[in-house]
Image: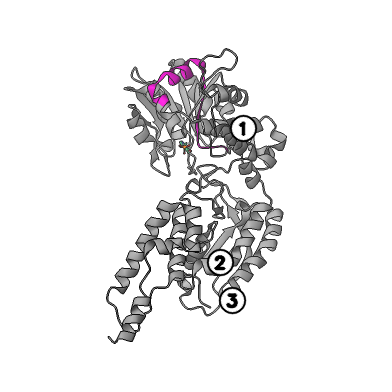
Amino acid sequence: MNPHQRAAQAAARPPALDRLLARDAMQALIAHHGRTEVLAIAREQLAQWRALHEVAEAGQAGFDAQAFEAACARVLAGRAQPSLRPVFNLSGTVLHTNLGRAPLPAEAIAAVAAVMGGPGNLEYELGSGERGDRDAHLEGLLRELTGAEAATAVNNNAAAVLLVLNTLAQGKAVPVSRGELIEIGGAFRIPDIMRRAGARLVEVGTTNRTHRRDFADAIDSRTALVMKVHTSNYAVQGFTAAVPETELAQLCREHDLPFVVDLGSGTLVDLTRYGLPAEPTPRQSLAAGAQLVTFSGDKLLGGPQAGLIVGERALVARIKRNPLKRALRLDKMTIAALEAVLRLYRDPDRLAERLPTLRLLTRTRAELQALAERVAPALAQALGAHAVVQILPCRSQIGSGSLPVERLDSVCLAITPPPGLRRAGSFPQRLAAALRALPVPVIGHIADGQLRLDLRGLEAGAQEQSFVAQLAQLRSAAGAEVLPQA
Ligand SMILES: *Cc1c(COP(=O)(O)O)cnc(C)c1O
């Protein structure tokens, strides 16, 4: 190495760390991310540079401070990105468990914001100045909306079922129809919950047909209660028979046993008034003679994750005394959100405007078609010659174990590869990945070699605008290797 080369190389080595950190760009990063964080990443980047440049070779590019700063900024931005983020749910499933189920109304978000930053009367009676009960914020509304004598709330409906069974049936037997031994996604299975609750499942009847006499034969001195489970995510069709709630309730009364209904989704209003298929309500089950009904807060009800238990006062009181209730109880943010959502039900006339779940479910084909015609050109422009965008009719599902066989007429943007594209087979997957890489990831679904974006999940107005605005970044977000090559 001649002296000239040696000098060039010396000039290309990185300066000392504090000299690097004193530069304007690094100071800006410190102001944003904090000194500790920037220092750690700068050290890491320098170590990487050294590892790559350990073996000095003549002609090798030297240290580039600007490239170093850009790399630090990129890593820091990635680390600052929250893990849990909003996405656009254009999957065609409105209540998508993996995408957080029900979107909350503005009223619920405001209620959460109002109580989360400081103290509140969570378990405190403002009238007497004495210790209160956190269920009190919900119980009155739940009684009003279901006709129940009493109510309590826990973490989710799985917890509600567990708590009911553990309280009323530990060490005892619970007959359930073989047609109702459900599995809900995410490892909720009736036989498993039953076991964990300490109860013994007694299978009754057959998969397709269960009769009153099957239950009557199963009941003996060890029976704790009879449970009916709503077959939320499937339908048994054809030669079938199930025992109506009124008959099971009658049978339970004859044997002095509680009759418990796990409604799964449940809804607090008659959905047919909004043009939707009928879904059973807790009020109906209670009127049919159920002593307890359990249902979810974040399915058709359209609220936060919660499990609701409504029914007879004495039974609810026993449930509330179970130490497991303490382990499964709701936090103040959920209670605030749930209370606000339940209040909306007092005005059913405006519910379809104010409750996002119902608003999404009641959108018309015409409305979605108009939205598609506004949005499709922006998507086509963003993709350029890389893809073909079409507006097609499709069918949305409600999801989360609600109305499993019903579909709602909807409209989607269907994206196909341009004619003659190489590697066209993996086109939908690559495009789906590119859409997921956007600042607000867009989740679609793949069918028949197309990527489909069901527009039922995209609200007109602010959501539509932010969806369109970020499409310009589609190519840079994806990177050339992800986005299909024309
Ligand atoms: C969804 C569902 C559950 C579980 O409810 P989570 O709120 O998801 O815990 C239990 N039973 C039935 C019938 C359901 O549909």
Asked if 344 appears above or below 173 in the picture, the reply is: below
Q: Is residue 55 above or below residue 86?
A: below
Is residue 196 visible in the rendered image? The answer is: yes
Q: Is label 1 in contact with label 3 (beta carbons under 8 Å)?
A: no
Marks 3/2 in contact by CB < 8 Å: the verdict is no
Residue 81 belongs to the span the image colors magenta: no
| Amino acid type assigned to the residue bearing label 2 in the image | Leu
Q: How many marks?
A: 3
Residue 45 horizontal side relative to residue 236, left or right: left
The percent position of residue 63, horizontal first and vertical second, equals 39, 73
Q: Which mark is residue 385?
A: 3
Q: Assess mark 3: CB under 8 A from ligand 1?
A: no
The circle on residue 474 is 2
Q: Residues within 10 Å of mark 2 (few under 14, many from 20)?
A: many
Indicate the position of residue 393 as horizontal and vertical percent values.
Answer: 63, 60
Q: Which residue is mark 1?
A: 340
Quadrant position of residue 440: bottom right
- Residue at mark 2: C-beta within 8 A of ligand 1: no
State the image quarter where residue 140 is shown: top right
Alpha carbon separation for disc pair 3 and 2: 13 Å
The stretch drawn in magenta includes residue 322: yes
